[in-house]
């Protein structure tokens, strides 16, 4: 039998994205020394001193009802009480994190923990409103927390100055929702899978100048829609989509009108699977719909894969630009998108914006994400399912439900054996198809020249 002290030490290994299993059926991150089976893992973390404790539920006070009167009129006292008791973790407090934190604090959540180990630099002042020149050289999380406490003293704002790499999976058990901003794909996926171990809902978001995205994994989320009763009443047990089901229906009379209170349940997949999943069938079936898909999704998937292969973002070097161009073209083909939408201009604009922060983009994405978090906490309205893209060039903000391919005969409540459809976007021998006039952008020299100008 293994030594118990050694076993406990093994389960305290910090997050390491390089040890993440890439198996399609993986539910949990495999960290150094951890048992493979969930039951063994949970048993090894049974020590109460190792597990964070959730605070008890507190009723909303009369003062808070007066303070939040206008939003209570929108979603009710019960929803505000759920928001009041929420404990949220925000990873990263740059421009996007500033907007998310501001919106959540003003909405009156119970507690917000900001995790960021980096210090404020002069460049931060151009896009982050929670800091000033006096904060240069100080920890970002601590500097932002001071201003957030001023915004709403009723919210418990905690600054955690440690790095995300130092955190163990059980760290996320204390939170209802974890929001990871500006994280590389591998790290965001590792955080996501750690959250799933404790049924913690997860968001990932990032921005690059005029572009950005928000991803949500709420695991299994129930919410309520209230509407006028139509000629076709809602029925419990009805599957509205492959991920959403009606689970309960009530009827009430209000102002001489019949109203339906419909409880629905939405099922989600983790970031790791969504990133390899095809576009929705209704999009793939229509060429017109595919032409409307922003090539930003291919650029982002290309960026994620480039980060996985190199551990960094593309630079202006020729070899980096050639690799990024190749990967992004492959992703575009896998998504079955028309080759003419992925142009040299698209590459140039994306690379030019890569890594930059523009406040209007941060404000839009931060507002969208925070509003979805509020809806999820209050269990009202349809939540984001599951990828929102923002293309500032064309002022488009589509939402796509990216779901892994599985047998449609399976119930949405049963475990899914998922994976990419065999051969999607590749030839029979596993290589990417190549064409001259009809294929993806193949003139990498032009790509590299344009990208050099963008980087320079």
Image (tube, rainbow, N blue to C red):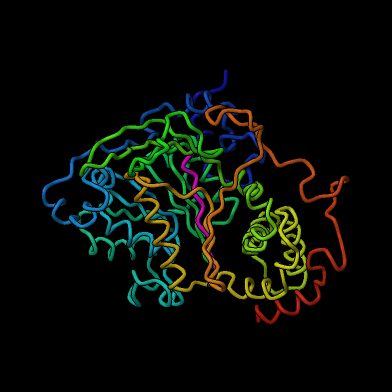
Write the residue at 58% across / 33% down. Answer: 33
Write the residue at 50% across / 53% down. Answer: 204
Say whether residue 267 is magenta: no
- Residue 111's place in the image compared with 321, above or below, is above
- Residue 25's place in the image compared with 97, above or below, is above
Which corner quadrant holds the N terminus? Answer: top right
Q: Indicate the quadrant where residue 303 lies.
A: bottom right
**Residue range highlighted in magenta:** 210-219
Q: Where's residue 367, x and y in %?
A: 39, 62
User: Is residue 203 visible in the rendered structure shown here?
Assistant: yes
Q: Where's residue 150, x and y in %?
A: 23, 64
Question: Is 426 on the left-hand or right-hand side of 6?
Answer: right
Write the residue at 72% across / 79% down. Answer: 450
Which corner quadrant holds the C terminus? Answer: bottom right
Number of marks in the rendered image = 0
Q: Where's residue 112, x and y in %?
A: 32, 52
Dominant SS type (magenta): strand
- Pick the residue in front: 437 or 253: 253
Write the residue at 58% across / 26% down. Answer: 37
Question: Is 399 on the left-hand or right-hand side of 289?
Answer: left
Q: In the displayed orientation, state which residue is furthest to the top.
A: 1
- Pick the residue in front: 344 or 31: 344
Question: Is 425 on the left-hand or right-hand side of 4?
Answer: right
- Pick the residue in front: 274 or 52: 274
Q: In the displayed orientation, state which residue is furthest to the front.
A: 231
Say whether residue 218 is magenta: yes
- Residue 193's place in the image compared with 305, above or below, is above
User: Is residue 12 visible in the rendered structure shown here?
Assistant: no
Q: Where's residue 135, x and y in %?
A: 35, 72
């Amino acid at each position: 039998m293994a030594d118990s002290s050694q076993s406990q030490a093994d389960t305290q290994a910090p997050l390491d994205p390089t040890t993440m299993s890439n198996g399609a059926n993986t539910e949990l991150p495999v960290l150094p020394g951890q048992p493979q089976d969930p039951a063994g893992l949970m048993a090894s973390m049974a020590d109460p001193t190792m597990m964070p404790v959730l605070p008890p539920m507190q009723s909303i006070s009369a003062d808070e009802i007066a303070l939040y009167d206008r939003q209570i009129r929108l979603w009710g006292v019960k929803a505000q009480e759920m928001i009041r008791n929420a404990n949220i973790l925000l990873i990263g407090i740059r421009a996007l994190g500033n907007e998310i934190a501001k919106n959540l604090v003003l909405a009156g959540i119970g507690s917000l923990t900001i995790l960021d180990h980096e210090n404020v630099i002069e460049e931060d002042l151009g896009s982050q409103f929670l800091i000033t020149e006096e904060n240069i050289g100080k920890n970002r999380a601590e500097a932002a927390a001071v201003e957030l406490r001023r915004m709403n003293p009723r919210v418990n704002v905690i600054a955690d100055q440690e790095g995300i790499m130092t955190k163990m999976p059980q760290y996320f058990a204390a939170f209802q929702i974890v929001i990871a901003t500006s994280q590389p794909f591998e790290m965001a996926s590792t955080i996501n899978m750690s959250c799933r171990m404790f049924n913690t809902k997860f968001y990932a978001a990032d921005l690059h100048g005029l572009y950005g995205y928000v991803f949500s994994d709420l695991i299994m989320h129930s919410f309520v829609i209230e509407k006028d009763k139509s000629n076709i009443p809602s029925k419990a047990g009805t599957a509205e989509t492959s991920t959403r089901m009606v689970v309960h229906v009530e009827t009430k009379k209000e102002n001489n009108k019949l109203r339906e209170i419909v409880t629905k349940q939405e099922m989600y997949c983790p970031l790791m699977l969504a990133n390899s999943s095809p576009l929705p069938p209704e999009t793939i079936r229509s060429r017109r719909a595919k032409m409307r898909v922003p090539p930003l999704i291919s650029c982002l998937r290309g960026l994620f894969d480039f980060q996985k292969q190199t551990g960094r973002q593309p630079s202006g070097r020729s070899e980096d630009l050639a690799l990024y161009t190749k990967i992004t073209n492959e992703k575009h083909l896998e998504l079955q998108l028309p080759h003419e939408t992925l142009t040299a201009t698209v590459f140039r604009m994306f690379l030019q914006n890569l890594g930059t922060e523009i406040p209007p983009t941060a404000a839009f994405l931060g507002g969208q994400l925070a509003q979805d978090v509020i809806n999820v906490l209050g269990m009202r309205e349809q939540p984001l399912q599951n990828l929102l893209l923002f293309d500032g060039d064309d002022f488009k903000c589509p939402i796509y439900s990216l779901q892994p391919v599985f047998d449609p005969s399976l119930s949405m409540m049963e475990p899914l054996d998922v994976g990419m459809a065999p051969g999607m976007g590749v030839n029979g021998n596993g290589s990417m198809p190549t064409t001259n006039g009809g294929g993806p952008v193949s003139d990498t020299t032009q790509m590299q020249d344009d990208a050099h100008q963008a980087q320079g």
